[in-house]
Image (cartoon, rainbow, N blue to C red):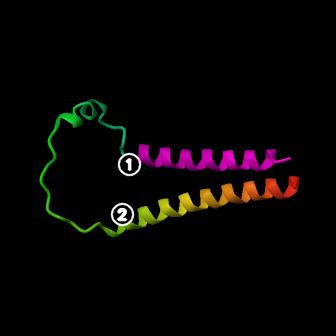
Amino acid sequence: MYFPYLIAYMAAGFVISLVTFLWALNAGQFKDQKRARFLPLEGEPEMAHVRAPRSYRIKVFILFTLACSGLIATAVAIAVTVLKDG
């Protein structure tokens, strides 16, 4: 059956989401909750165009790689399921 693939897929998703949550917690994403409620009321500050730092590009590349690997894992799980049953 395809249950081991489903469990492995769910476990991988859980691990990725746990790592992402721990990163956000470590980076201080949830520190100032009282300020967050007033953010929609603030105006956008005028900023000069700044080139993205190298660390930002690396993070975008890592997130893109994770998304692609998730899509590939889904395609492999579907292909294995279809080929085994057919």
| Three-letter code for the amino acid on which mark 2 is drawn | Tyr
How would you classify the magenta stretch by its main secondary structure? Answer: helix
Name the disc covering residue 56, or none. 2
Q: Which residue is mark 1?
A: 27
Q: Are marks 1 and 2 in contact (CB under 8 Å)?
A: no
Disc 1 element:
loop
Q: Residue shown at 43%/43% (left/top)?
A: 25
- Secondary structure under tag 2 reads helix
21 versus 77 height, above or below: above
Instruction: Relative to 6, say whether 66 is above or below.
Output: below
Residue 16 placed where, x, y %?
57, 50
Magenta-span inclusion, residue 84 = no
Q: Tell me which amino acid carries mark 1.
A: Ala
Q: Residues within 10 Å of mark 2 (few under 14, many from 20)?
A: few
Q: Position of residue 86 (x, y in %)?
A: 87, 55
Looking at the image, the residue that sits furthest to the front is 86
- Residue 7: image quadrant is top right
Residue 5 shown in magenta: yes
**Residue 83 appears at what percent x and percent y?**
83, 58
Give the quadrant of residue 66: bottom right
* Residue positioned 22% across, 32% down in the render: 38
Q: Which residues are magenta?
A: 1-26
